[in-house]
Image (cartoon, rainbow, N blue to C red):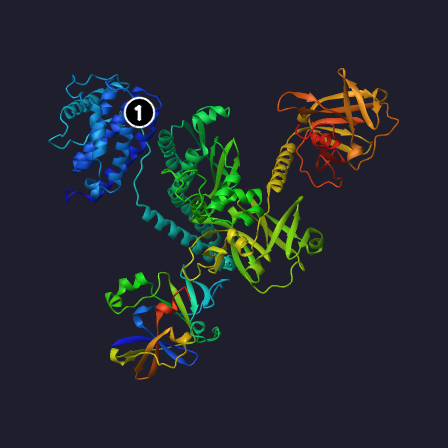
């Protein structure tokens, strides 16, 4: 390589060429899938051509030869003299990889072996060189670019007939405008500037320090607002500017996950091609942004998950057809925001993971003893896939199953402050869910106090806070041997006392009001008892020094606004230190989902149209209108009794009746009422039509109205009670009719 | 001639080559780290940098240091800082640690000089536990100086 080449020019070339490569890959894959169009071929050709031009100018011969070797078959493809065939695409993709390898080490690009790739590409164009000159292609570009484009073509033709051009090419940049016009992008692109990442990192650290400095300044001056005139607006201004500055700098480090998603189709395609599988990759939410360092650290875990899915997860086309699925499998990559975190979901519709096979392998590999395996719960059995040195592949292939597996995925993701969860259904597929913080640098954290010390808990680990009054403790906290569990909405939450885990001197628990921080650990939850809750603070994470790295309870340290150093608690470390073992949470998970559904129900009910009705004279009830199929008026004399059950004839069939007072602690309807009403809720059967399942007997319809209510806890407990609220001067009980019908046994649980 | 920064632990006058010392501080607030090694006293905020403070007393087999008016903290240069300030450091086999550490001592003394041929190996009657952290002694004008083996003091596996 020429010594005189400017470093900057070179790095510019590398960066630009990388972008070309990134753009080429999806296009080549599209061509391979048969989604061929004139535009796509042109685009790939131009990208290869630009790389060749730049490399020639800089005297990078190896890169130039490779780009040139790729360009030739592309030109023939463009002119219709070659057609898309698997060997052609394989050779082009291999060429692309070689270029990538050379670009990653430009100084030694000559030494990278690529003869095989070059040979394969040259073989493709053999016999075409002597063919007549290039035909003018059908162009889809605006007229003012034609001349320029034609010039490129002339150069191409020269090069086609001469495998090694004698002189370096002038730097041709003909395609930018054509490309933009073709792709429909605006001609006026946003101006951008390349900046060294190290500089950005430094700026970000400085901004972090500035935030801390500002906090200290605000604290130090807080008493002086009256003494110094004009201080308040100055401080407010500094406060705002600092925040904006920090946010701006963080923004510069944000990258769309599309950068790593884009690799997925290629990874999957290579495996699918080798194993004779057919897999479609769907990318959703590519524009969701994450901190650059997180995006980079996700490359390996994501690649691994994709390989696992394509290699082990997805069956051969024959097996899929036998199982009644389409021969083409689908892997969906989905990124989305949820509660201040970014969720990455990789879902396949393959065979799922057989927990029995996981256990067999774990035993065979000595990860676990057979006797211990018997004690495992269903979830723990599945969790074994995260154990180091375990692979469920039947045979060790060169694609995956080399003994490093999901444990690396979990380690990497947890290092980023995230969580991994796996959900699988045998025969239906596997979903891997990664929860990630938006940015590594600054994370919102709850500052808690224990035995006079403060510690930070990252908000991503926190589910909620529960306040347990000293008086309540006896009824809400149960003891099983030494273990304490907290009753929380029908769930039992294992409790861990932070002071005990950290071996700090602590007064006996529950003597005073206590704070419980509910922490998330993969699919599990546990409660951490702390002395005090302070505030949410944005903290800058500093890694632990080697002297204290052995302390598994902490993931790092930080400096608070007042200058004190505090430790950052790690939920997984605390749980491990406390020796928490999570039982089979299948049931509790179902409970939790039900709870979530119920809460969603409540939220929705808040803005809904409701029907207000009464059973006994003074008790008011409400049901959401969209839960109701019909409201019917009946006469008491129409009711027929069979044993203790009541029916009424409704559209030629017996409709079972449900009385509220049989299931809830409410007054019965007066016996002498002649006229009654029936609320017939919508019942969905077998996921299909809506039908009448039963009728709720009430005495009177009071009103139908749109309300916005905040439901409070209800004094009346029972099936279907969502809560109560004060409406039109009456305490009103809000009901979910289906649950009532289920409890009454008139409709099935599945309905 | 080598310059030593001297300091006192209980009744021992100890010395460290001046080259390894970055600065000497009065004590700042120390945040303890639960579950850490016994000689790890905690973390301090040194102008935005988190520094681990080690209790040299515990290392040498004494009780944890009581913090008094004379208590000081000797902040050590990291390996990379050492490499930057002096090529000589490497030649003399001076090593500290990759992360910044500070040593908690009872009191700070003067900087003294000693000729390299005045360095002797540690007396044989030093206990094994203590002996490991002491590389030798040096005769100076102001008396005998106990020289520390930083490599052992800063090791994280013992």
In percent of width and height, residue A680 lies at 73, 24
Question: What secondary structure is marked by label 1?
Answer: helix
Nearer the observer, B4 or A373 = A373
Please state if B126 lies on the left or on the right of A531 as rendered. left
Q: Quadrant of the N terminus of chain A?
A: top left
Nearer the observer, A298 or A457 = A298
In percent of width and height, residue B60 lies at 42, 74
In percent of width and height, residue A650 lies at 76, 18
**Subunit ID for the residue under disc 1:** A
In percent of width and height, residue A90 lies at 29, 28
Quarter of the view holding residue A125 = top left
Residue drawn at the location 84% of the way across and 27% of the way down: A643
Q: Quadrant of the C terminus of chain A?
A: top right
Please state if B69 lies on the left or on the right of A82 as rendered. right
Asked if B84 appears above or below A127 in the picture, the reply is: below
- Residue corresponding to mark 1: A86
Residue drawn at the location 84% of the way across and 20% of the way down: A638
Classed neighbour count for the residue bearing mark 1: other residues with Cα under 10 Å, few (<14), some (14–19), many (≥20): few
């Amino acid at each position: 390589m020429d010594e005189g080449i400017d470093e900057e020019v070179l790095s510019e070339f590398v960066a630009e060429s990388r972008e070309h490569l990134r753009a080429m890959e999806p296009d080549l894959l599209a061509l391979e899938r048969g989604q061929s169009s004139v535009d796509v071929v042109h685009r790939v050709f131009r990208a290869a051509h630009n790389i060749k031009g730049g490399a020639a100018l800089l005297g990078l011969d190896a890169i130039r030869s490779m780009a040139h070797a790729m360009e030739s078959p592309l030109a023939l493809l463009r002119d219709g003299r070659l057609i898309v065939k698997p060997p052609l695409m394989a050779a082009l993709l291999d060429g692309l990889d070689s270029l990538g390898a050379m670009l990653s080490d430009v100084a030694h690009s000559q030494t990278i072996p690529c003869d095989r790739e070059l040979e394969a590409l040259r073989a493709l164009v053999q016999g075409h060189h002597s063919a007549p000159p290039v035909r003018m292609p059908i162009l889809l570009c605006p007229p003012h670019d034609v001349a320029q484009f034609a010039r490129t073509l002339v150069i191409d033709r020269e090069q086609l007939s001469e495998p090694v051009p004698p002189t370096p090419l002038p730097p041709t940049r003909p395609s930018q405008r054509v490309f933009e016009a073709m792709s429909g992008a605006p001609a006026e692109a946003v101006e951008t500037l390349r900046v060294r990442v190290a500089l950005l990192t430094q700026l970000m650290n400085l901004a972090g320090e500035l935030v801390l400095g500002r906090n200290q300044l605000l604290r130090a001056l807080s008493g002086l607002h009256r003494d110094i005139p004009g201080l308040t607006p100055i401080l407010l201004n500094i406060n705002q500017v600092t925040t904006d500055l920090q946010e701006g700098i963080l923004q510069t480090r944000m990258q769309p996950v599309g950068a790593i998603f884009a690799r997925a189709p290629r990874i999957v395609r290579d495996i699918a091609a080798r194993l004779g599988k057919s897999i479609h990759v769907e990318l959703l939410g590519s524009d969701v942004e994450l901190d650059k360092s997180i995006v980079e650290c996700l490359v390996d875990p994501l690649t691994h998950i994709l390989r696992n899915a394509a290699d082990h997860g997805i069956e051969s086309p024959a097996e899929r057809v036998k199982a009644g699925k389409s021969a083409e499998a689908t892997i969906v990559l989905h990124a989305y925001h949820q509660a201040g975190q970014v969720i990455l979901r990789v879902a396949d519709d393959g065979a799922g993971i057989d927990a029995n096979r996981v256990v067999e392998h774990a035993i065979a590999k000595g990860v676990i003893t057979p006797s211990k395996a018997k004690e495992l719960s269903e979830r723990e059995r599945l969790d074994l896939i995260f154990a180091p040195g375990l692979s469920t592949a039947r045979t060790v292939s060169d694609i995956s199953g080399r003994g490093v597996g999901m444990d690396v995925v979990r380690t990497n993701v947890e290092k980023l402050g995230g969580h991994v969860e796996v959900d699988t259904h045998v025969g239906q597929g596997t979903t891997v869910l990664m929860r990630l913080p938006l940015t590594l640098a600054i994370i919102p954290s709850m500052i808690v106090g224990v035995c006079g010390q403060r510690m930070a808990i990252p908000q991503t680990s926190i589910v909620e806070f529960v306040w347990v009054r000293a008086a309540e403790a006896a009824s809400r906290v149960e003891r099983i041997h030494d273990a304490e569990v907290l009753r929380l909405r029908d769930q039992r939450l294992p409790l861990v006392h932070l002071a005990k885990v950290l071996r700090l001197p602590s007064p006996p628990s529950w003597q005073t009001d206590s704070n419980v921080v509910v922490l998330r650990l993969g699919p599990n939850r546990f409660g951490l008892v702390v002395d005090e809750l302070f505030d949410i603070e944005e903290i800058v994470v500093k890694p632990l020094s080697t002297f204290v790295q052995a302390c598994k309870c902490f993931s790092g340290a930080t400096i608070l606004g007042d200058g004190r150093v505090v430790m950052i608690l790690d939920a997984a470390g605390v749980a491990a230190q406390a020796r928490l073992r999570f039982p089979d949470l299948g049931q509790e998970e179902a409970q939790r989902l039900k709870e979530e559904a119920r809460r969603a129900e409540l939220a929705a009910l808040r803005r809904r149209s409701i029907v207000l009705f009464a059973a006994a004279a003074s008790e008011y009830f409400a049901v959401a209108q969209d839960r109701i199929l019909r409201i019917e008026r009946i006469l008491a004399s129409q009711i027929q009794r069979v044993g203790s059950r009541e029916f009424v004839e409704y559209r030629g069939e017996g409709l079972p009746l449900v009385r509220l007072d049989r299931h809830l602690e409410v007054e019965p309807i007066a016996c002498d009422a002649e006229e009654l009403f029936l609320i017939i809720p919508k019942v969905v059967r077998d996921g299909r039509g809506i039908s009448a399942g039963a009728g709720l007997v009430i005495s009177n319809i009071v009103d139908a109205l749109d309300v916005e209510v905040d439901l409070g806890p209800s004094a009346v407990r029972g099936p279907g009670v969502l809560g109560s609220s004060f409406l039109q001067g009456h305490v009103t009980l809000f009901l979910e009719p289906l649950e009532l019908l289920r409890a009454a046994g008139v409709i099935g649980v599945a309905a | 001639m080598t310059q030593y920064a001297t300091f006192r632990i209980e009744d021992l006058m100890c010395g460290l080559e001046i080259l390894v010392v970055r600065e000497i501080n009065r004590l700042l607030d120390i945040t303890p780290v639960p579950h850490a090694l016994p000689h790890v006293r905690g973390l301090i905020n040194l102008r935005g940098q988190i520094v681990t403070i080690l209790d040299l007393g515990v290392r040498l087999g004494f009780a944890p240091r009581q913090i008094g008016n004379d208590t000081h903290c000797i902040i050590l240069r990291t390996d990379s800082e050492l490499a930057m300030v002096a090529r000589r450091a490497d030649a003399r086999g001076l090593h500290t640690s990759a992360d910044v550490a500070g040593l908690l001592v009872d009191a700070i003394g003067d900087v003294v000089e000693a000729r390299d041929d005045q360095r002797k190996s540690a007396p044989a009657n030093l206990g094994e536990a203590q002996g490991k952290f002491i590389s030798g002694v040096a005769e100076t004008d102001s008396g005998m100086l106990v020289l520390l083996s930083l490599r052992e003091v800063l090791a994280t596996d013992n």
